[in-house]
Amino acid sequence: MSKTNLKPCPFCGTESVDLMETLSGIGGLDGEYYISCWCCGAEGGKENTRKKAKITWNCRYKQKGKGQ
């Protein structure tokens, strides 16, 4: 199994981020996963797999027209 490294928080820059899991649905069978920052509380989008949650967190968008 390949390990996906998590990027630092895009808001505060800390590397103190972790994969979190929520259990929802009847009997807690439908888990959702997201990345959360322990420093500022930022959260990534909720996804149905750990891998997708990591990919979503690591995605960074550049703004156009900001001197780039």
Image: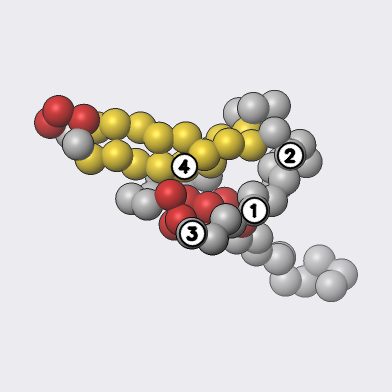
Instruction: Tell us which disc is closer to us: 1 or 4.
Output: 1
**For marks 2 and 3 on the same chain, the one whose residue lies earlier in the sequence:** 3
Q: Which image quadrant is residue 41 in?
A: top right
Label 4 crowd bin: few (<14), some (14–19), many (20+), radius 10 Å: many
Residue 49's x, y, as percent?
37, 52
Instruction: Tell us which disc is closer to us: 3 or 4.
Output: 3
**For marks 4 and 2 on the same chain, the one whose residue lies earlier in the sequence:** 2
Q: Which image quadrant is residue 60 in?
A: bottom right
Q: Which residue is mark 2?
A: 15
Q: Which residue is mark 3?
A: 1
Outermost residue toward the right in this view = 67
Asked if the residue at tag 4 contacts the one at tag 3, i.e. Cβ–Cβ closer than 8 Å, the answer is no
Check disc 2 and give the amino acid type. Answer: Glu
> In the rendered view, does 43 fall on the left or right side of 15?
left
The numbered dot on residue 34 is 4
Check disc 3 and give the amino acid type. Answer: Met
Check the picture and name the quadrant holding the C terminus: bottom right
**Residue drawn where x is 29% and y is 39% of the image:** 31
Check disc 1 and give the amino acid type. Answer: Asn
Check disc 4 and give the amino acid type. Answer: Tyr
Q: Which residue is mark 1?
A: 5
**For marks 1 and 4 on the same chain, the one whose residue lies earlier in the sequence:** 1
Asked if the residue at tag 4 contacts the one at tag 1, i.e. Cβ–Cβ closer than 8 Å, the answer is no
Instruction: Tell us which disc is closer to us: 1 or 3.
Output: 3
**Residue drawn where x is 35% and y is 32% of the image:** 22
**For marks 1 and 2 on the same chain, the one whose residue lies earlier in the sequence:** 1
Query: Mark 2 falls on what kind of element?
Result: loop
Query: Mark 4 falls on what kind of element?
Result: strand
Image height of 44 relative to 21, above or below: below
Asked if the residue at tag 2 contacts the one at tag 4, i.e. Cβ–Cβ closer than 8 Å, the answer is no
**Residue drawn where x is 43% and y is 49% of the image:** 50
